[in-house]
Image (cartoon, rainbow, N blue to C red):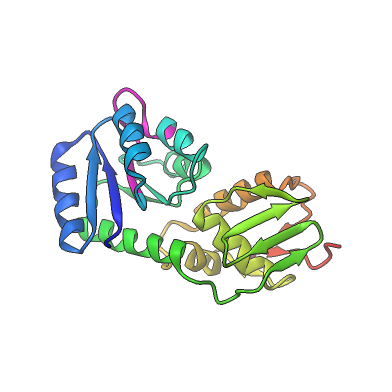
Amino acid sequence: MSQKILVVDDELEIVKVVRAYLEQSGFRVITASDGSQALAVFRHEQPDLIVLDLNLPQLDGIDVCRAIRRDSNVPIIMLTARVEETDRLIGLEIGADDYITKPFSPREVVARVRTVLRRSTAVPEQSGLITIGALSIDPLKHEVQLHNRSIDLTPSEFNILLVMASQPGRAFSRMDLLDVAQGEAYEGYERSIDVHIKNLRQKLGDEPRDPTYLLTVYGVGYKFSDKVQ
């Protein structure tokens, strides 16, 4: 059965075009035109991925994303017309996996949907249980536990943590981690890795100035500590 995509935007022409391109590519598409409707459709339909506009009537995309993240780790791609990079990163800070800036090509949307879905459903090369101190990562079950407590991660966050924890002590550049998180390194997106690392540190209880797990390698990127007991 084909994968189901929820497209949420109040610009009906955008919805029409994106829907047509996704359906031509073999996806099933459901739509919503405001935040409240988006949440209702999400809960009823349980889509495999959501393409979510940031600026929506009633509930905006930020509120919708936060509400969904309380219940689900479904992949989310944010659409935004905002031009400032800090604004474009807001979606990532609240749990989106990727974002696309308007105006965009419908083919880009299809490509990014495929990439995010592939990354969220692929069987990891590292399949064995990883246990480092109180942290355990199960690649096959897509589960993370810390002190026997489950940690909810988005697909991008999980993939970044998995690849770093698989090679403690190795320094990864932001471009390396972009490939892990998004499949392709899009120009201007390196800062999105900083947001994913920030979110991971918060969820793991890492102090930003003295982290236990995810260390900053200045001038390079990040690494998973090889000194965790």
Q: With respect to residue 134, does 88 lie above or below?
A: above
Percent across and percent down for residue 60 are: 36, 29
Image quadrant for the N terminus?
bottom left
The image quadrant that residue 203 belongs to is top right
Percent across and percent down for residue 41 are: 30, 37
* Rendered residue at 76%/46% (across/down): 209
In the visual, does 229 lie left or right of 75? right
The image quadrant that residue 59 belongs to is top left
Image quadrant for the C terminus?
bottom right
Q: How many labels does the image show?
A: 0
Percent across and percent down for residue 89 are: 47, 44
In the visual, does 214 lie left or right of 143? right
Decide whether residue 61 is among the magenta residues. Answer: yes
The image quadrant that residue 113 belongs to is bottom left
**Quick check: can you spot residue 217?**
no
Q: With respect to residue 162, does 85 lie above or below?
A: above
* Rendered residue at 35%/39% (across/down): 42
Which of 37 and 171 lies nearest the eye of the viewer?
37
Q: Give the range drawn in magenta.
A: 50-62
Percent across and percent down for residue 44 are: 33, 38
**Quick check: can you spot residue 128?**
yes
Quick one: which residue is furthest to the right in this view?
Answer: 229
